[in-house]
């Protein structure tokens, strides 16, 4: 798999390059120091996956993602070191077509890369989803009759944050329903995503907690790297299955 690296920081380029070189079947396609250069290189030589930084000179990662997806679509994984400060930019990049967001890996004192396997999995997932190689679980879960409010379930991946905000802004604060949201985003970004969405829509937005019974007028966002489910006691829960699903959490 050929990987394009877009980052203006030498330390980040070093760790990303090392991660690529240490992964069997991966190799560096090219390295761009800013978004403008990334667009040019992607058009001339599209890689299998682009590792996109957010804050760069000339053109940031949000604009570069939009340009690439409109001119030469390519799987893009946003890589950022600061979750709290860059969450809005990350969601904007996803709105422009980025597939996922992940923390920039770091070196351990012994020179090894922290969480290398997880980072490798993110790259593979980004490529697989873009190619449409998603596995679907056919299980059905039956929820017993209860006094629950109506349930609206929304699932989103690429472009999800902006699309979800657009849909949810149109709902009345007095809606007689509970909204469950599964956005394909890593658990480290889930709290920031819920906070961002809460500021964008009229309804209350919270992370979905294990054992919570949904209430009307509230939006519950899946917040772990497990699947959000409705248990038979009509409370929310998280499960690790289906294990083969490339997107966790996912929706079916």
Image (cartoon, rainbow, N blue to C red):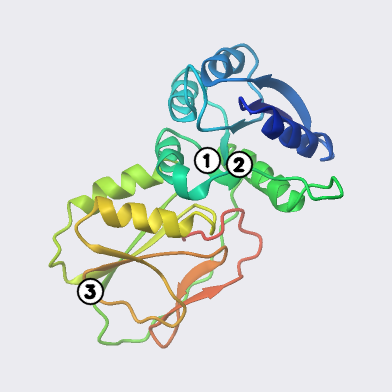
Task: Give SS at disc 1.
Answer: loop
State left or right for residue 124 relative to residue 109. Answer: left
Quarter in which the N terminus is drawn: top right
Give the residue displayed 46% in from the left and 73% down from the top: 229
Residue behind mark 2: 126
Q: Position of residue 41 (x, y in %)?
A: 61, 14
Q: Are marks 1 and 2 in contact (CB under 8 Å)?
A: yes
212, above or below 3, in the image: below
Task: Give SS at disc 2.
Answer: helix
Q: CA distance from mark 1 to mark 2?
A: 6 Å
State left or right for residue 21 relative to residue 224. Answer: right
225, above or below 23, in the image: below
Q: CA distance from mark 1 to mark 3?
A: 31 Å
Give the residue displayed 37% in from the left and 86% down from the top: 144
Q: Position of residue 111 (x, y in %)?
A: 85, 45
Image quadrant of residue 159? top left
Residue situated in front as seen by the camera: 247 or 78: 78
40, above or below 98, in the image: above
Residue behind mark 1: 99
Q: Quick one: label 3 or label 2, which is nearer the N terminus?
A: 2
Q: Position of residue 206 (x, y in %)?
A: 35, 66
Q: Quick one: label 1 or label 3, which is nearer the N terminus?
A: 1
State left or right for residue 241 relative to residue 14. Answer: left
Residue behind mark 3: 216
Image quadrant of residue 104? top right
Badge 1, how many Cα within 10 Å: few under 14, some, many 20+?
many
Q: Quick one: label 1 or label 2, which is nearer the N terminus?
A: 1
């Amino acid at each position: 798999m050929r990987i394009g690296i877009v980052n203006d920081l030498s330390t980040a380029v070093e760790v990303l390059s090392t991660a690529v070189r240490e992964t069997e079947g991966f190799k560096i396609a090219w390295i761009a120091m800013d978004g403008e250069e990334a667009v040019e290189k992607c058009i001339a030589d599209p890689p299998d996956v682009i590792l996109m930084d957010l804050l760069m000179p000339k053109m940031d990662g949000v604009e570069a993602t939009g340009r690439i997806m409109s001119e030469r679509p390519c799987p893009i994984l946003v890589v950022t070191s600061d979750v709290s400060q860059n969450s809005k930019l990350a969601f904007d990049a996803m709105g422009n077509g980025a597939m996922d967001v992940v923390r920039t890996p770091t070196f351990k004192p012994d020179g090894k890369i922290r969480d290398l396997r997880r980072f490798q999995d993110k790259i593979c997932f980004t490529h697989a989803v873009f190619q449409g190689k998603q596995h679907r679980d056919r299980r059905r879960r039956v929820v017993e009759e209860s006094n629950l409010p109506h349930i609206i379930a929304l699932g989103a991946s690429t472009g999800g944050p902006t699309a979800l905000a657009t849909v949810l802004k149109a709902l009345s604060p007095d809606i007689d329903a509970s909204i469950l949201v599964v956005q394909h985003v890593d658990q480290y970004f889930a709290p920031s995503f819920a906070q961002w969405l809460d500021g964008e829509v009229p309804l209350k937005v919270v992370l979905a907690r294990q054992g919570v019974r949904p209430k009307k007028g509230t939006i519950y966002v899946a917040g772990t790297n497990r699947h959000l489910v409705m248990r038979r006691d009509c409370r929310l829960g998280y499960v690790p299955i289906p294990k083969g699903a490339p997107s966790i959490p996912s929706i079916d």
